[in-house]
Amino acid sequence: MAGIFIISSDPHLRRRVKSLLPPSGHTILGESGDGMRALRQVRGLSPDLILLDADLPGGSLKIAKIIAEDRIAPILLLSSSWSGELIHQARSTWIFSFALKPVTGVNLLPAVESAITSYTHLSRAEERADTLDRALKERKIIEQAKGLLMERLRISEGEAYNRIRRQSMNKGVSLAEIARAVILLYRDRD
């Protein structure tokens, strides 16, 4: 199911988590009791989820912010208590779920699934947004190229589009690539 990395300075907590997750199909990719060492390790491992102990010396939220900035993996925060301040600070990180310590299968496994599911939904939404953004940018470039062709060659919008489309098909490249070439060609002539 998921490859998980554990960051906690508490060896008992790490052992407990390692006893709970493999029977449910998850793989423990690694563990560390030191936040900075853990960052070096997770960059190379690319885990599906990071379990981060809120009581990590040096500040778990500092580590969580670095993980978020580098977009390494979603985080499940293991905390001994719910704190409004902790939850507020966690909003600027990639903490996708919380589980209270002491961890049990009853509170850990649903939190793991929730974090992975939420992260998957977010990733898909980001991919769709990126795709739409690219399409919009390409559409603007094509419109700009059509406008230049219409102005310079005194042709209709339909004819300008057909010329771009024909070149795209003849050369086996995207409409946007032909549009960029048109823009460069006419900009150089100015």
Image (cartoon, grey):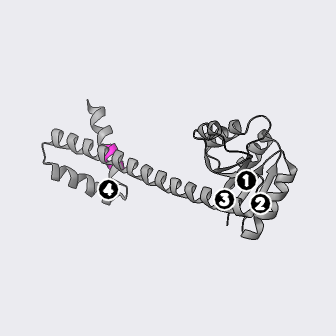
Q: Which residue is mark 2?
A: 28
Which mark is in front, 4 or 1? Answer: 1
Mark closer to the chain start, 1 or 2: 2
Helix, strand or loop status at disc 1: helix
Answer whether residue 154 is magenta in the image. no
Real-space Cα distance between discs 4 and 1? 41 Å
Measure the alpha-carbon separation of dots 1 and 2: 11 Å
- Residue 81 found in image quarter: top right
Tell me how far mark 4 sits from mark 2, CA to CA.
49 Å
Say which quarter of the image contains residue 108: bottom right
| Amino acid beneath label 4 | Ser
Answer few, some or many: residues within 10 Å of disc 2's Cα (few below 14, many 20 plus, some between 14 and 19): some
Give the foreground label among 2 and 3. 3
Question: Percent from the top left, x then y, of residue 165?
Answer: 27, 56
Q: Which residues are magenta?
A: 177-181
Viewer-nearest of discs 1 and 3: 3
CB under 8 Å between discs 4 and 1: no
Q: Residue 97, relative to residue 86: is it above or below? A: below
Name which of mark 2 and mark 3 comes first in the sequence: 2
Q: Is residue 89 left or right of residue 39?
A: left
Around disc 3, counting alpha carbons within 10 Å, would you say few (fewer than 14), some (14 to 19), or many (20 or more)? Answer: many
Q: Position of residue 32 (x, y in %)?
A: 82, 48
Residue at left offset 69%, top offset 62%: 109
Q: Which residue is mark 3?
A: 112
Q: Quadrant of the C terminus?
A: top left
Q: Which residue is mark 4?
A: 168
Q: Which numbered circle lies on residue 45?
A: 1
